[in-house]
Amino acid sequence: SQQGEEDPQALSIQEGENATMNCSYKTSINNLQWYRQNSGRGLVHLILIRSNEREKHSGRLRVTLDTSKKSSSLLITASRAADTASYFCATVIQGAQKLVFGQGTRLTINP
Amino acid sequence: DGGITQSPKYLFRKEGQNVTLSCEQNLNHDAMYWYRQDPGQGLRLIYYSQIVNDFQKGDIAEGYSVSREKKESFPLTVTSAQKNPTAFYLCASAVQAGSYNEQFFGPGTRLTVL
């Protein structure tokens, strides 16, 4: 079964607006990572947040983690057409040596 | 340029054939991974290797085989035992297999069974 599940599955917004994607997971984790995938390409790592962190920023990206609710959110501020992609959360289960990916959110930025 | 490469980009296979997908990295990473991605889905782990001459099964290893004879290379063979091999295959590497390391992905190979 999936460890992480993103919500919504698809999101379409206007350029300049903020985009928020959510990720929920089931078991205790060491850290949670977000990746971006452009259509037909490999994934690119965006940001990693550790289980003892609550918020992290990287440029226009803001990630939050709530371990009590087993959830994370990715906020992209001032969206651009180039942000159009699928976004995946990936969790590292405690004691494991592998990432477990969610099904992703397909984000479309309309010019 | 440092990075991870996969070849070919597109691969067509007839039913009953084995095919091998190439993955090479020059990042000096110890850990390498193979994932399968189906349309509109996330990634599922096929095999991973933490060090040369060692590898472990992932969640969907049946019908696949790998080798890790060199640090920089981790080829994946899709055998005829894999009943539904049409998918997008992604290779990744990491400094180590530890949980705090980001993974670097190749551009992928799209395999189609004719």
Image (cartoon, coloured by chain):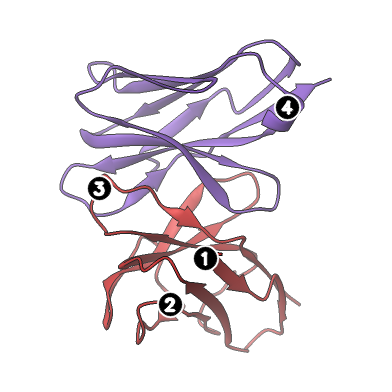
Chain colours: A purple, B red
N-term mark: 1 or 3 = 1
**Alpha carbon of mark 1 to alpha carbon of mark 3: how far?**
20 Å
Give the structural element (helix, strand or loop) at label 4. Answer: strand
For label 2, the residue is B74
For label 4, the residue is A108
* Neighbourhood count class around disc 3 (C-alpha, 10 Å): few under 14, some 14–19, many 20 upward: many
Give the letter of the chain under mark 3: B
Give the structural element (helix, strand or loop) at label 1. Answer: strand
Question: Along the line of sight, which residue is nearer the eye, B46 or B103?
Answer: B103
Horizontal relation, residue A37 to residue A69: left or right:
right
Nearer the viewer's eye, disc 4 or disc 1?
A: 1
**Alpha carbon of mark 3 to alpha carbon of mark 4: how far?**
31 Å
Dots 3 and 2 on the same chain: yes
Which residue is at the far top? A17
For label 3, the residue is B99
* Residue type at the position of mark 1: Ile
* Residue type at the position of mark 4: Thr
Q: Position of residue B114 (x, y in %)?
A: 76, 77
The quarter of the picture where residue B51 lies is bottom left
**Alpha carbon of mark 2 to alpha carbon of mark 4: how far?**
34 Å
N-term mark: 1 or 2 = 1
